[in-house]
Image (spheres, rainbow, N blue to C red):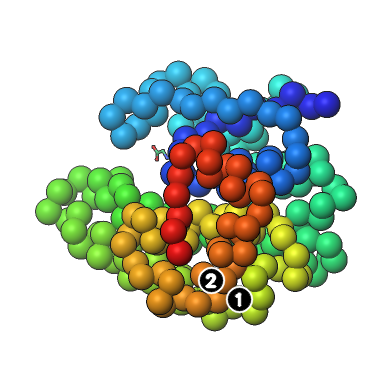
Amino acid sequence: MPQIKLYYCPKTCALAPLILLHEAGLKFVTVQPTLNGDQFSEELRLINPKMRIPVLLLDGETITEVPAVSAAIANLAPAMHLMGREPLDSLRVYEWMNWLSGTLHAKSFGPLFRPHRFSDDPAAFEGIKAKAMESINDCFDLIEEKLTDVYAVGGAFTVVDPFLFVFYRWGNNAAGLEMKDRYPKYTALVSNLLQRTAVKTALEAENLELTL
Ligand SMILES: N[C@@H](CCC(=O)N[C@@H](CS)C(=O)NCC(=O)O)C(=O)O
């Protein structure tokens, strides 16, 4: 059995790999890095110089970035086809994960949560957050348009679904959007995920809620 350690914090994008670890039925431990205000304390730098979570320690290898961490967990449970069953499904998984990470997370929620990283001028923060909200709305509209099923890819659960779950939660709980009214297909995907034991276990373990 591999030695698995996930650096994790409640309410963050690290919820996606946490769900995947539960889905894959793997034995693992979680570590919550200490916070210094709204930044992680310096000791995380030794593990991940980017000072971000999730970080997966897998038999001594350090893996960072949600798409790579998710793929690493998928590799540990090949029978589950978490990166997609067919070659085209896997391409769709890469397409989703790259866009969710680079556009919805980094370019949209990033400036909403931390506008100070985008300007040194506090007077600019409200404008940055407004632009971030525009981008979040555009991304959610596109997600709603793309979904045809309660799973994002290939009619089956893949690593994309828990990542979509994270952003739905942020849209609902952090950005204050009426997700249920505005995005029926996205809501159906999330509602379906909420029935899964792994999702329930991950949410319960971290005392997180999502009421639809
Ligand atoms: N591109 C990174 C982003 C990771 C990231 O920004 N994680 C957030 C939690 S959702 C974090 O560590 N934030 C701490 C900070 O921004 O200081 C990934 O996909 O893992």
Q: Is there any visible trace of residue 98 in the rendered image?
A: no
Q: Amino acid at mark 1?
A: Leu
Disc number lying in front (1 or 2): 2
- Residue type of the residue flagged with mark 2: Tyr
Q: Residues within 10 Å of mark 1 (few under 14, many from 20)?
A: some
Along the line of sight, the residue nearer the viewer: 41 or 17:
17
* Picture quadrant where residue 125 is located: bottom left
> Looking at the rendering, in which quadrant would you find the N terminus?
top right
Q: Please name the residue shown 55% across and 30% down the image.
A: 7
- Picture residue at 47% right of the left edge, 76% below the top: 183
Question: Does 129 appear above or below 148?
Answer: above
Q: Quadrant of residue 30?
A: top right
Name the spot of residue 77 as percent of width and height, x first: 82, 44
SS label for mark 1 = loop
177 on left or right of 85: left
Q: Disc 1 to disc 2, how far (Cα)?
A: 7 Å
State which tag comes first along the sequence, 1 or 2.
1
In the picture provided, is 210 more to the left or to the right than 146?
left
Residue 191: x percent and y percent? 56, 64
User: Which quadrant is the C terminus positioned in?
Assistant: bottom left
Farthest left residue in view: 123
In the displayed structure image, the side of residue 4 where residue 124 appears, left or right? left
Q: Are marks 1 and 2 in contact (CB under 8 Å)?
A: yes
Give the number of marks. 2
User: Mark 2 sits on what residue?
Assistant: 186
Q: Give the farthest residue toward the right.
A: 79
Instruction: Please state which of residues 4 and 178 is positioned toward the viewer in this rendering.
Output: 178
Image location of residue 90, percent across then percent down: 77, 62
- The kind of secondary structure element at disc 2 is helix
Q: Which residue is mark 1?
A: 147
